[in-house]
Amino acid sequence: MNDMLKNREPFDIEGHADYGTSYARPKQEGVDTTHGAILYLEDITVSFDGFKALNKLTLDISVGELRCIIGPNGAGKTTMMDVITGKTRPTSGTAFFGQTMDLTTMAEYQIAHAGIGRKFQRPTVFEQHTVFENLELAMKMDKRVKPTLFFKLTSEQKGRIDDILKLVRLNGQEHRLAGLLSHGQKQWLEIGMLLMQEPQLLLLDEPVAGMSDAETARTAELLNELRGKHSIMVVEHDMAFVTEIARDGKVTVLHEGSVLAEGGMQQVQADERVIEVYLGR
């Protein structure tokens, strides 16, 4: 385990949340959300050889909000997430995490450390290690060489891992190799690994793609449990799943790199523009 930890990026160990016996919202330092928004994008444009993948995109996510993003292929959903996580620099526009962190000036690792976690459509877990070890590796802690050499889990840290195992429906699977999990279980494990890093904002790219109906239903339950404890952006094509998790929240529809429509699920589904370019009749 120590050899695995040596090669991980160092994390700030300040501001740990006390998960206790129930899952609590993590506390992050340095992110000013006094104005109510955790993420604010304004007039974001991304051009690739003259093609505008994003075209003056403007949206904001409130603290504790679960926002669903839908739209046809090529609408700019992935590029938007790339901008938020620092993978792609916008041609123009501003992107703020909280009130003070300008994401366009930060490196990917800085953005991750600041409290933004991203899960891609295809799960990426350490398949040759157990579920427990995967969560341990992902834990937010000091991973410089010296602390790592003498690292030993505390009872509190073990308790946090146990809490996450229960939350992501993997309690009882902690000693199983991650590579032996079902596709859906791997997706839950990766969400659990993100949660171990104590993010304020979770970006989930098609979290139920390839899942069975039962796994999809359990994932909806999981995200509904996370609602309010983290701000969550979900990009998804499964409209039944979106309807289940959108509840009374907002759904944003992207088309050609801009916001086409935004509102409650019923409002969006009834929008003639959305029907024309995405939902169909």
Image: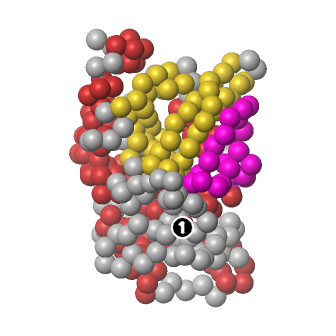
Count the labels in the image. 1
Expressed as whole percent of the image width and height from the top left, the position of residue 153 reads 51, 84
For the N terminus, give its image quadrant. Answer: bottom right
Q: Name the residue under label 1.
A: 28
**Quick one: SS at disc 1?**
loop
Q: Nearer the viewer, residue 235 or 123?
A: 235
Q: Which of 269 and 144 is in front in this view?
A: 269
Identify whether 232 is placed above or below 157.
above
Identify whether 267 is placed above or below 25.
above
Which residues are the magenta region? Answer: 87-109
Q: How crowded is mark 1: few (under 14 residues within 10 Å), some or many (20 or more)?
A: some
Q: Which of 48 and 56 is in front in this view?
A: 56
Expressed as whole percent of the image width and height from the top left, the position of residue 133 reads 49, 70
For the C terminus, give its image quadrant. Answer: top left
Name which residue type carries label 1: Gln
Q: Residue at x 46, y 75 (%)?
A: 17
Expressed as whole percent of the image width and height from the top left, the position of residue 44 reads 64, 32
Q: Which residue is drawn at 26% across and 41% down?
A: 247
Q: Which residue is drawn at 66% across and 67% down?
A: 8
Q: Residue at x 51, y 54 (%)?
A: 35
Query: Taking the image as drawn, is residue 238 in sight?
Result: no
